[in-house]
Image (cartoon, rainbow, N blue to C red):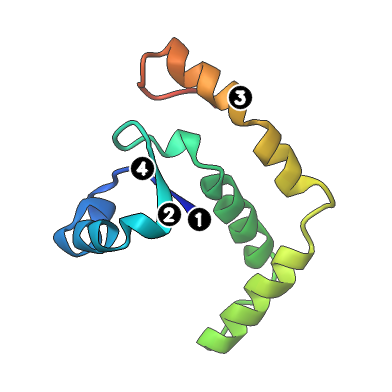
Amino acid sequence: MGQFQHDNATTHASRVATNWLQKHSSDFRHFHWPPKSPDMNIIEDIWDALLHVVEKRSPPRTSMDLLTSLQDSWCEFPPGYLQTLDESMPHRFASLLRVHGGPTRY
């Protein structure tokens, strides 16, 4: 069984997304996050890091160039980068609890 999380952003709460989640709910555990709290999601950090690495390269001209650039950039992440983000989760939760679900400085 997999795990699924989302931050209840408008696009994630659309009728199509909601119907899909209900239809596939037995395929994964669903984590309930505070509404619109991307602060909790380490994917935001990963996207930001990928963006910075891709921007240092020559601009991709095709979608295949972009895919290659993203894959190469992924491989350039320092060893332990993802582990560090994963280990930051307890601190992120503590920060969120301190502000009672509001925006965090993390």
Q: CA distance from mark 1 to mark 2?
A: 4 Å
Q: Which residue is mark 4?
A: 7
Does dot 1 land on a helix, a strand or a loop? strand
Decide which of 99, 93 is in the foreground and name it: 93
Q: CA distance from mark 4 to mark 2?
A: 16 Å
In the rendered structure, which disc, 4 or 1, sits on the residue that comes first in sequence? 1
Residue contact between numbered discs 1 and 3, judged by CB atoms under 8 Å: no
Rendered location of residue 3, percent (x, y)? 48, 50
In the rendered structure, which disc, 1 or 2, sits on the residue that comes first in sequence? 1
Label drawn at residue 25: none
Rendered location of residue 45, percent (x, y)? 58, 45
Residue contact between numbered discs 1 and 2, judged by CB atoms under 8 Å: yes
Q: Which residue is mark 3?
A: 90
Q: Which residue is mark 2?
A: 28
Q: CA distance from mark 4 to mark 1?
A: 17 Å
Q: Residues within 10 Å of mark 4 (few under 14, many from 20)?
A: some
